[in-house]
Every structure is written in structure tokens, then in C-alpha cells.
Image (cartoon, rainbow, N blue to C red):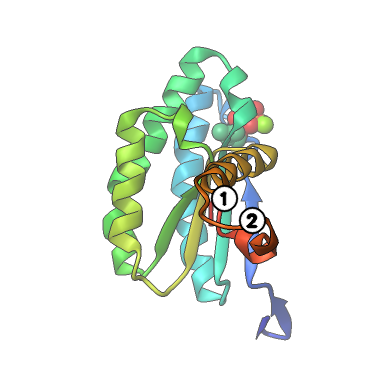
Amino acid sequence: MSELDGLKIPQHVSIILDGNGRWAKSKGMPRTYGHTMGAKNIEQICMDADDIGIKYLTVYAFSTENWNRPSSEVAALMRLLNFYLKTIGKKAMKNNMRMRIIGDREGLSDDIRRAIDDIEELTKNNTGLQFLIAINYGSRNEMIRAMKKMLADYKKGDFKEEELNEEKFASYLDT
Ligand code: IPE
Ligand code: MG
């Protein structure tokens, strides 16, 4: 932990996005306006987090449960994510920010998957704020995906049962 005015700054902060819809409604605007403005806010939060010495920031942007929302809202959120991933590169490079996306990519469109690969590749050597975005993320889902990959490698004979330890398991997780 670092310190700021005597305040202990944690290494890793995570944020669950919430209230976008209610915030927009209180302004007489559609829910999607709330999502757009929420996404803009994240940019400032990243800069502030970096300024005060936070190393890792995880933002939960779209959960596995969010697919249950009306299809028009899901579509709007996907468009926003796509736009965000495709346009954030310049700012990420300027701020030396490394970006990684955690979550199940299988459920995402090819276009968004490509945008994820591109932004991760572009920012991979940046050493400032490590910015993680959870998209289509669920912790059990992550563990199941890890176990499936591990099982496939085990069947191929990549490692022996005795070699399975925490470190090995961690290597199959999203980060
Ligand atoms: C968070 O805001 C954004 C996402 C989950 C994508 P909400 O959409 O949950 O907004 P409220 O909670 O309905 O106001
Ligand atoms: Mg909510």
C-alpha cells in the first residue's frame, strides 16, 4: 500500500458499475444515456486511480447476468463496449495504461473479440495503471473455463497430477 495524506492506498480496487439507468432516468433521459456517461466517467476514474497510486483497477462492465436485460439494452451496451475498446487506445498509450479484459469471450461478437485482442496487444508493454475490464464475467464461469482448459491439457499429457498446484491452476485463469 502507498500513502496519500496519511490515507492508505490499496494496490487493487474494483468497481461494479451500477445505477447508470436510475441516474439517467432522474435526468429524464434514456437508460443508454446513463451507460454512455458512465463509460466517460471511467476515463476520469482511471486517471485519478493512477494519480493516487493504485496499481490495479478492475471495472465490472457487463456480467453474465446482464444478458437477461431487454435485447435493445444489451445491444446498446455491446455497441458502447465496442466503441470504447476501439477508441480508448490513444488515451491508454498516452497514460501508459495496460488494459486486459477478463471474462468469457465465447459469448461475445467477433468484432468485440477483435477489439479486445487489439487493445490488449497495443497496451501490453505499458507499465502504469493496470486496467482490467470484466465483460461477460462470472467467477464460477472463469473457474469452469480454467478447469476445462486444464483438463484438455491433462488429457494431452501436458502435465502429471502431482504437478497440479495453485500456481499451475492460476496459469489457467483469465489474468
Ligand atoms: C450499471 O448500471 C451498468 C451495467 C450493469 C452495464 P445499471 O444498468 O445497473 O443501472 P441501474 O442499476 O438499473 O440504475
Ligand atoms: Mg443496476
Q: Which mark is residue 137?
A: none
In the foreground, 102 or 27: 102
- Please provide percent x and percent y for residue 130: 48, 65
Location of residue 85 (image quadrant):
top left
At numbered mark 2, what does the secondary structure look like: helix, strand or loop?
Answer: strand
Q: Residues within 10 Å of mark 2 (few under 14, many from 20)?
A: few
The residue under label 2 is which amino acid type? Ser
For the N terminus, the image quarter is bottom right
The residue under label 1 is which amino acid type? Val
Mark 2 touches mark 1? (CB < 8 Å)? yes
User: Residue at coordinates 67% horizontally, 84% vertically from top-left?
Assistant: 3
- Please provide percent x and percent y for residue 66: 60, 26
User: Ligand 1 lies in which image quarter?
Assistant: top right
Q: Is 168 positioned to the left or the right of 115 in the image?
A: right
Label 2, label 1: how many angstroms apart (C-alpha)?
6 Å
- Please provide percent x and percent y for residue 78: 42, 29
Q: Which residue is mark 2?
A: 14
In the foreground, 162 or 23: 162
User: Residue at coordinates 61% horizontally, 30% vertically from top-left?
Assistant: 64
